[in-house]
Image (tube, rainbow, N blue to C red):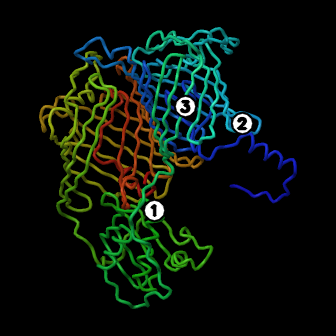
């Protein structure tokens, strides 16, 4: 909690404050630091100790004679930056087999991370430590320690690099004084790549590097000068001539979201690039929505007749709430249904309360709003009408929304519903999909997009039949040539037939299954399903979830017996059968905001046993970034390229791309290499998602 110090400011303190401001003069135009060639905040080739604001996401493209770099950099925390990069090495082919990859040049994946050790002060520089290209092939693998200090319009940087950043060898590795083993840097020991080679960190030759960034009087233009820590004699593109160890660049801020840069490197090579930025915390969309209802000074008197259909209509229009059931007594009103418009729970409840306060008699003292999920009552918000009206009309300066509401486990209503809606019947929905993959042998970028049509019949709140079909409208997956892996490790092919599944037909059956779900006890939910469960598997399974209202902790167990679907026919099955399932914990630590940890342990589709760790970071806009890794008893050699399953998923709310308030969202996954190890079943419904409103993480 911040505190205000009510003490006189001494002359010495005032002088120190003035010195701090002058020494770290910040240009208001520079709302974020520029990206370096490999992605991430830096000079040209060399990283700095600087970080952007939390949530800043940058998409980058950089082009020079030997290389093209595509990268995405995200400021996950104020003290941590991550970067994902694809490198196109133009001097080398993807493979020596033209039938396999044609004339496509070599592509390499890389992941970087940088951590702030301490902030810049009046006299001390900011200090950061980082690793580049860890966990992959390590072609650009390196580590660095760097300090940055600003003075007026100049930003000075000095660092020491190892690996790719230290091949200039202008100093001795300082860690060699601890033990001679630090003097030797070994290459990747994993033949399949993908494993983090901790034992090579800070080993081998080292080099000092440095540079200056200057903000010119013309605000959009910044100039960079750096001393390179690499000599490029062992470069992945081959031996590169370095006429000069100094690189120069100019960065032009075309808009607040777009940077253009031009560089001259090694005294002989010109490069250019484009960087586009957005902040995941502040991202928003202008909305067209009704103005909040104003509660009149004189409300409806007791005994006023209430029209239920009017309540239905007003709640849908004003609050985006589809009412399923409605009950009114002399002192209470209960409405149950689905929220379809407002992600923010405070805005949703406020709008609901305003409608009820306007259209309900003043004698109704309690509003009960029951939100459903997957046909089940999830959470009940109890509103004290009098307290809410004081808050909404601002009758009291101290009244808050929190004082007038309480979120509880839904309670059964007494007596029949005043009005209720039909539960059974047919339904249809339509949605779009987009699949993509990077770095394939045939083409660097492959994609498939189209429509998913869903239909089904709902028998009641518990039972339903559901189906979905996928129609491909735009794709280049037909260019797939590589159908079967040449490496036979003896591992069942549970996922690597993906090419056959996505390219065999323009219209395919996604799923078709019978579903039962219910709340079996307070805080306990269950479901079971049978049929075609996903693109590749049919079978039977079930799940049990424990999730109290507004709890930071939830548990689930699922178990499934499935058979692999035949990719050559819609309803055929292969002989492969497997019993798979997991126990999963979901935890949101109280000591760190907007973080969720998911840990699953169990048996995967290839009959390997292990654990999946997933860390999710939620930003203020509702965007969630998830990073996951799975380690099982399958060896790296059995797994194949990549050594183990890992990847990232970006989840975004549709509300950010719609001018009308909406719920729901979409996913953009990035899995560098999907093999057969550590692969779970893609169940059609997961209870943690269906029950999200009980303890919202993503909105």
| x 38%, y 74%: residue | 334
Q: Earlier in the sequence, mark 2 or mark 1?
A: 2
Residue 310 appears at what percent x and percent y? 31, 79
Q: Is residue 531 visible?
A: no
Evaluate whether residue 623 shows in this view.
Answer: yes
Q: Residues within 10 Å of mark 3 (few under 14, many from 20)?
A: some
Foreground label between 3 and 2: 3
Which of the image's four quarters has the C terminus?
bottom left
* Displayed quadrant of residue 557: top left
- Is residue 217 found left or right of 589 in the rendered image? right
Q: Quadrant of the N terminus?
A: bottom right
Specify whether 442 is left or right of 262: left
* 321, 521: nearer the viewer: 321
Tally the numbered discs.
3
Helix, strand or loop at mark 3:
strand
From the image, tell me which residue sits under label 2: 151
**Looking at the image, is 269 positioned above or below residue 306?**
above
Secondary structure beneath label 2: strand
Circle 1 packing at 10 Å, graded few (<14), some (14-19), many (20+), is few
Mark 2–mark 1 Cα distance, whole angstroms, equals 45 Å
Q: Nearer the viewer, residue 622 or 676?
A: 622
Q: Position of residue 549 (x, y in %)?
A: 46, 58
Who's the residue at 57% across and 49% down the image?
Answer: 590
Could you tell which of marks 1 and 3 lies nearer the N-terminus?
Answer: 3
Q: Which label number is shown at residue 72?
A: none
Q: Which residue is under mark 3?
A: 250
The vertical placement of 299 against 567, above or below, is below
Image coordinates of residue 337 in percent, x first then y, are: 33, 67
Instruction: Point out the residue furthest to the front here.
Output: 218
Q: Position of residue 299 (x, y in %)?
A: 46, 87
Residue 518 is left or right of residue 285, and the answer is left
* Residue that carries the numbered disc 1 in the rendered image: 345
């Amino acid at each position: 909690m911040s505190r205000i110090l009510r003490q006189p400011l001494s002359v010495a303190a005032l002088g120190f404050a003035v010195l701090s401001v002058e020494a770290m003069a910040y240009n208001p135009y520079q709302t974020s630091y520029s990206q370096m060639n490999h992605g991430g905040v830096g000079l040209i080739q060399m990283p700095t100790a600087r970080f952007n604001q939390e949530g800043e996401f940058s998409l980058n493209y950089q082009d020079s004679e030997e290389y093209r770099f595509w990268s995405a950099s995200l400021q996950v925390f104020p003290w941590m930056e991550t970067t994902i990069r694809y490198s196109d090495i133009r001097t080398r082919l993807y493979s020596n087999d033209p039938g396999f990859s044609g004339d496509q040049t070599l592509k390499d994946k890389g992941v970087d991370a940088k951590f702030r050790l301490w902030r810049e002060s009046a006299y001390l520089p900011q200090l950061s430590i980082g690793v580049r290209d860890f966990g992959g092939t390590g072609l650009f693998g390196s580590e660095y320690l760097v300090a940055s200090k600003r003075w007026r319009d100049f930003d000075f940087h000095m660092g020491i690099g190892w690996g790719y950043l230290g091949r200039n060898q202008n100093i001795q590795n300082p860690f060699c004084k601890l033990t001679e083993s630090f003097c030797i840097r070994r290459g990747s020991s994993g033949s399949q790549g993908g494993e983090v080679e901790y034992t090579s960190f800070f080993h081998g030759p080292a080099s000092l590097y440095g540079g200056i960034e200057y903000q010119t009087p013309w605000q959009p233009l910044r100039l960079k000068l750096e001393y390179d820590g690499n000599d490029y004699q062992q470069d992945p593109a081959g031996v590169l001539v370095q006429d000069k160890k100094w690189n120069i660049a100019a960065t032009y801020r075309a808009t607040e979201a777009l940077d253009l840069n031009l560089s001259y490197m090694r005294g002989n090579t010109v490069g250019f690039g484009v960087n586009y930025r957005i902040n995941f915390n502040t991202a928003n969309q202008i909305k067209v929505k009704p103005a909040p209802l104003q509660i009149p000074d004189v409300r409806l008197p007791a005994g006023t007749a209430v029209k239920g259909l009017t309540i239905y209509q007003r709640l849908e229009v004003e609050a985006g709430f589809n009412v399923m059931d409605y009950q009114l007594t002399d002192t209470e009103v209960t409405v149950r249904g689905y929220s379809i418009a407002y992600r923010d729970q405070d805005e949703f409840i406020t709008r609901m309360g305003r409608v009820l306060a306007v259209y309900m008699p003043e004698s109704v003292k309690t509003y009960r709003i029951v939100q459903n999920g997957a046909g089940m009552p999830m959470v009940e918000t109890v509103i004290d009408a009098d307290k809410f009206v004081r808050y909404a009309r601002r009758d009291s300066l101290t009244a808050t929304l929190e004082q007038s509401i309480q979120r509880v486990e839904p309670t059964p209503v007494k007596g029949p519903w005043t009005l209720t809606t039909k539960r059974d019947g047919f339904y249809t929905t339509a949605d779009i999909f987009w699949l993509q993959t990077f770095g394939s042998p045939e083409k660097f970028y492959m994609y498939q997009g189209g429509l998913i049509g869903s239909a089904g019949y709902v028998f009641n709140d518990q039972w339903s039949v559901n189906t979905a079909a996928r129609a491909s409208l735009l794709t280049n997956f037909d260019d797939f040539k590589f159908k079967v892996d040449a490496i036979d490790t003896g591992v069942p092919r549970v996922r690597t037939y993906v090419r056959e599944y996505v390219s065999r037909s323009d219209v395919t059956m996604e799923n078709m299954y019978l579903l039962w779900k219910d709340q079996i006890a307070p805080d306990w939910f269950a479901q079971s399903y049978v049929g075609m469960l996903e693109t590749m598997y049919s079978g039977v399974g079930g799940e049990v979830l424990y999730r109290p209202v507004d709890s930071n902790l939830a548990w689930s167990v699922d178990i499934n017996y499935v058979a692999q679907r035949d990719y050559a026919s819609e309803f055929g099955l292969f002989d492969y059968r497997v019993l798979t399932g997991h126990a999963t914990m979901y935890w949101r630590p109280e000591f760190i905001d907007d973080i969720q940890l998911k840990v699953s342990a169990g048996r995967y589709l290839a009959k390997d046993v292990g654990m999946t760790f997933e860390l999710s970071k939620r930003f203020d806009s509702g965007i969630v970034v998830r990073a996951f890794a799975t380690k099982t008893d399958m060896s790296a050699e059995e797994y194949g390229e990549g050594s183990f399953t890992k990847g990232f998923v970006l989840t975004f709310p549709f509300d950010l791309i719609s001018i009308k308030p909406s719920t729901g969202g979409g996913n953009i996954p990035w899995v560098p290499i999907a093999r057969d190890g550590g692969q779970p079943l893609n169940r059609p419904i997961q209870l943690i998602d269906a029950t999200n409103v009980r303890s919202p993480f993503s909105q």
